[in-house]
Image (cartoon, rainbow, N blue to C red):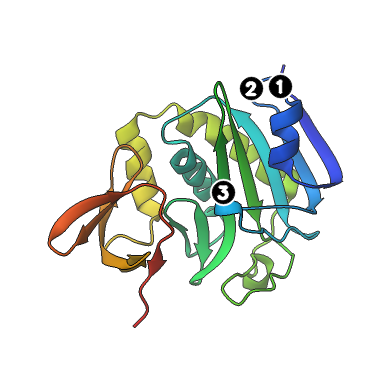
Amino acid sequence: MSLIHIVDKISSTNDWLSKYYLDIDDTIIALEQTSGRGRRGNIWESKRGGFYMSTVSSNHKLLSIVVAVSLAKVLTKKVVGLSLKWPNDLILDGKKVGGILCENFDSYSVVGIGINLLNEPRTSDSTNLSSHGFNFDKSILLASFLYNFDHVSAFDSQKIVDEFIIFDCLIGKKIHWAENSGIVKSIDLDGSLIVESEGKELNLYSEEVHIEKY
């Protein structure tokens, strides 16, 4: 039977769950993380007032896409203008309001989610939901996400990608990554980003991409 752990403060919900989980769907939610992190080891500031959770999942080739769609379905019931930036960012008014960290192991994956609810981010490229007039009960947000996550996980690959595209903010935009740039065309069935660059189509799998500003 899966368990939901509620803690006051922890170093990282992902780290704790990867060590101590007992079953698929075990979940932990914390009021504060002291060593929260995002992709590529980036620090995720996790002060009180935010939503920080992790859950254990079966391995899924489109896991980060599934998680993003599940979150968007919950949040957009209230939040007007929320979008998804491939592969793992929640965007509101051009700024990051949340992120996803999926870590894959041999027989399972750990899904971490951080959303700025009331906490005030320190960086100018981030925002929170409350400053835009949107407030959420954490217990309802958790339950709604877990319900949607279970539901969306059962979709076939095409439907998962189609659902992501509904919320996507990159298609048609010029982006840059490393020393390259191109126009985003779509999302492929393996979850990669399809980009046209110098007359050729190519797929990006884990690159850090940025919308080009004019």
Look at 74% across and 45% down and name the residue there: 12
Mark before the other along the chain sequence, 1 or 2: 1
Kind of residue indicated by mark 3: Ile
Residue pointed to by mark 1: 2
Determine the secondary structure under disc 1.
loop
Tag 1 near tag 2, CB within 8 Å: yes
Looking at the image, residue 36 lies above or below residue 55 = below
Look at 55% across and 53% down and name the residue there: 40
Determine the secondary structure under disc 2.
loop
Relative image position of residue 213 (x, y in whole percent): 37, 79
Kind of residue indicated by mark 2: Ile
For this orientation, the residue located farthest to the front is 179
Relative image position of residue 183 (x, y in whole percent): 24, 64
* Label 3, residues with CA under 10 Å away: few <14, some 14-19, many ≥20: many
Q: Quadrant of the C terminus?
A: bottom left
Residue pointed to by mark 2: 24
For this orientation, the residue located farthest to the bottom is 214
CA gap, disc 3 to disc 2? 18 Å
Looking at the image, residue 25 lies above or below residue 141 = above
CA gap, disc 3 to disc 1? 21 Å
Q: Nearer the viewer, residue 64 or 137?
A: 64
**Image quadrant in which you'd find residue 156:** top left
Q: Does 70 sit left or right of 51 as displayed?
A: left
Mark before the other along the chain sequence, 3 or 1: 1
Looking at the image, residue 65 lies above or below residue 39 = above
Determine the secondary structure under disc 3.
strand
Looking at the image, residue 130 lies above or below residue 58 = below
Kind of residue indicated by mark 1: Ser
Badge number at residue 100:
3
Q: Nearer the viewer, residue 191 or 133?
A: 191
* Label 2, residues with CA under 10 Å away: few <14, some 14-19, many ≥20: some
